[in-house]
Amino acid sequence: MRHGKYRFLVGALIVPLALYGVFVLSPYLQAFQLSFTNWNGVDSAPEFTGFDNYVKLLDDPLFLAGLRHNGLMLLVVPLAVIVVALALAAATKGTRVYRVVYFFPQLLSVAIIAVLWQFVYTPNSGLLNGALSAVGLDSWRRSWLAEPDLALWCVMAVMIWSAVGFYVVLFSAAMESVPADIMEAAAIDGAGSVTVFRRITLPLIWESVQVGWIYLGIAALDGFALVQIMTVGPGGPDNSTEVMGLGLYRAAFTFGKFGYASAMGVAIFFATLTIAALLLRVTRRERVELA
Amino acid sequence: MNLTRRTALAGVAAVAASTGLAACATAGGDDGDKVKQGDTSAENPLGVSAEAALEVVIFKGGYGDQYAIDAGTSLKQKFPKVAVDHKGIQGVGEVLQPRFVADSPPDVVDNSGAGRLDLATLVSAGKLTDLTSLLDAPSLDDPGKKVRDTLMPGVIEDGTFDGKPLVLNYSSVLWGVWYSKSLFAKHGWTFPKTWDEMLTLNDEIKKAGLHPWTWQGKYPEYLNDPLVSLAAKAGGFDLVKSIDNLQPGAWQSPAMLAAAEAIYQLAVRGHIMPGSEGLSHTEAQNAWCKGQVAFIPCGSWLEGEQQAVTPAGFDMVMGTVPALTGSDKLPNGAVMAASSESFIVPAKAKNVPGGLEFLRHLFSQKVARGFAETAKALPVVAGATDGLNLSSGLGSVAEAVKAAGPNVFSYKFRTWYAPLSKALDDATGELATKRINPQQWAGRVQKAADAVAKDSSIVKHQR
Amino acid sequence: MRTKHAALTLWAVVVTLPLVWALMSSFKTDAEIFDSPWTPPATPRLDNWSRAWEQASIGQYLLNTLIVVGGSLALTMLLGALTAYCLARYEFPGNRFLYYTLVAGMLFPVFLALVPLFFVVNNLGMLGTYHGLILVYAAYALPFTVFFLHGFFRSLPGAVAEAAFIDGASHAGVFFRVMLPMARPGMVSVGIFNFLGLWNQYLLPKVLNPDPDRYVIAQGLAELAVSRGARSDWSGLFAGLMIAILPILLAYVFFQRQIRAGLTSGALK
């Protein structure tokens, strides 16, 4: 009955596997190889330089700035998004229209969000300073993206702005699947709404929250598009918004240091992997189904 | 016009070109159907074969390609039987790379635009014709004058690699400080000749309720242009060379420090419009166009960029950066300039003499005048815009070129050493916001220059 | 209760205000945008939109995006479903290995691949081409698509397929006529997920698509916002932003339930 099984399998799998091999797998593997060379993209034979690039990374103020800033994003953005999203998800129960609106930013390209927010932050004709003046807070007006102490926070605010909606929807969907009789029972037992949330709702939707942590953690290691489009420099002022992805992009496509950029890529890879593993561990409450 | 992005793209294109060209080292060339050089004469100094076809590929970008069509028409008037095949295209590299690999390139290429071929690669692979015979040929307009003597200073140098002229750029870009002639007339201000006068005038401008300066803070390189111009004027060509050659201490030389101090003074004295450091080029230039600000630093493309938002009667003009001291090494009119729109004749072109002859027509007065009129940019042919009714901005740029005479300088480090450019941009952004002082500025940039000098993975150049 | 609604409204305002403000700005002149960011336009300038469409090439960018996203989405769905089906429903040596190799692609940050990917695409002569972007997009969307649909195909009952085989259907026939239609809900979810992901791509086109004539919409708008030397046109840029945003928002308003469900179920897999 099932004759030609292997012919079918080969026919079906050869194209996707070739595509995956050529454009995904081989670049990933080549990146490791390139990271041990000083290739500048022009020489036909890259020179093997061992761990030189990695040693340089540890001494590169731009890369270290990127690492620091991605680290700060990692501490701030996921937590802020999850707290705001949980609060809004709990509050929007029964009022669906808010969820529709909150979801808008999720539909926009991060590049478009960056262009939009550049207009929001711009000092003299921007939305934010205009709004502050409109409510009489003229002294709060700033050159938002041009002050080294503020710029990174402004970038993070955009990340939070664009991410919250998605997690409101994610969490409220999870909350709706919490059986109503459990909640009622708890309420009858005299538990306050905060207690109900902490003791009952949160554990029951924990899987969603955990997924959120991991997605947001990985996103916090990026930030390339926002920084590259919005910020002074980009990455400024004075590298105060530098992120690792931007450093890699610049090293490769502006400086022509392809070997070095590949080493940055490897570093980003291990950072991502570590974060994902750590978050999985820290947030583990029950077995997570991966496959 | 966007030098930084161009540099980035050049890097990408370098890579794009290198892979293909590496392969063509082994590809066999067919010289069989190459057009032989004909007899040379006073009328035909390059020995053009009267009946050979000529293929011309032009980047059709912001400047259009009418001027190249004009050059073809001009050539045909002299050699009516030459069939000129003109192609105006956008992705030059994409279209031509396979043809360079196969050694069957066109006869003339305007290698420009985002997707152009990488020049350094073409040069090192020996793909370009030496243009010396063209430069030494009599110019079309005046047989007593060689082509090389009709070009603005610096143009031949821009296209010379290891002593060989291989590229001729067609359009010239100048950097200066822009202001509105009508606004200045209204207040009775005159453009300052020295930086001291600039600071004095700035105080006056402030009293009149205007901001003296703004700049395109989101891209700090805009403020570097006046800064390094001031330094070049004070320190002369030697300083420019020492910077480009990464000489130790060049960024901390007295002229460079004084230039940084000059720019710093703008910030210290409150001459810069608040918020400028957070403005994009568009926002800063619009504030200036609306008459809120007196001065803005920019290259000669500003007039075209601001076309849509410039009020009637604004009459923008570019002033050359004022003298830094009373004892500057370069005279007052000295100006920073660079050229773009790179014309090449491929070494393996079928009709090399025809290609060279095409360039002789292209660099003639008549074609160059047409370029100024249709492209609204300055051609590198000296005196080509004389007597033309130029717009206010382009007219001031043409005058600046004339006033500069041979005192035209350009820095190469921006294209040679991108990491140094970045460090300079960052430092200047900090200098203009008073977060660092000139000494700290010079120290930071010098450190970056030293790092580049030490970095063996960066290819070094000398001038 | 009152604070709850105040908080909900506040966030709604925070989300919508930039969008509404950009919409308003897209009808103003450049001067009005710079002088009075808060005032509505004196007369609505519809020509901003037509100018953005034609002169600022937003129309071209949209067309490029449709070609690239449409092509890669179709390819991803076809290849992803086929792969997921084979791996989910056939036993053969190396099955697990292939599955984990594919799914591992989800773990790797694109930044790691960026430099070599540029050279791979360049060496294939595909830099700045539609087909180059389509293939790369599809390749990078494949891991998630396979991962998602693998679970889906596994959960489908086998009886129908068995019956089809007994009726003499070929392997391909069973896939296309029986299993694929049964997998429709999963296909829709992952399709929506992929569509938005591909539509919003920025990093890949930024590196692999240097030809301005082939810019996709997000890339084109970002370039317009930062491009220097070209004629400036901010009202046109705002109009361009709205042209890029509105079709997606409108589609969302009509299909919001499916879209939200598609995206969140994608995340939770």
Image (cartoon, rainbow, N blue to C red):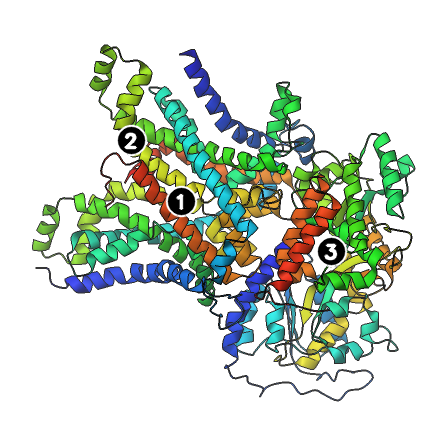
User: On screen, B57 above or below B51?
Assistant: above
Depth check, mark 3 against mark 1: the one in front is: 3
At 76% from the left edge and 64% from the top edge, which residue is drawn?
B241
Q: B387 left or right of A19? A: right
Residue B454 position, x and y percent, is 62, 63
Residue at numbered disc 2: A206
Q: SS for tag 1?
A: helix
Depth check, mark 2 against mark 3: the one in front is: 3
Three-letter code for the amino acid on which mark 1 is drawn: Gly
Three-letter code for the amino acid on which mark 3 is drawn: Trp
Disc 2 to disc 3: CB gap under 8 Å: no
Could you say which is closer to the camera, residue C153 or residue C94? C94
Q: Are marks 3 and 1 on the same chain?
A: no
Q: B296 left or right of C42? A: right
At 85% from the left edge and 57% from the top edge, which residue is drawn?
B334
Disc 2 crowd rating (10 Å Cα; few below 14, some 14-19, many 20+) is some
Is residue B119 among what the camera can see? Answer: yes
Q: Please state, as top left, top right, bottom left or bottom right, where the N terminus of chain C lies in the image.
A: top left
Give me the disc on residue B251: 3
Q: Are marks 2 and 3 on the same chain?
A: no
- Label 2 chain ID: A
Q: SS for tag 2?
A: helix
Q: SS for tag 3?
A: helix
Is residue C128 among what the camera can see? Answer: no
Q: Please state, as top left, top right, bottom left or bottom right, where the C terminus of chain C lies in the image.
A: top left
Three-letter code for the amino acid on which mark 2 is drawn: Trp
Residue at numbered disc 1: C197
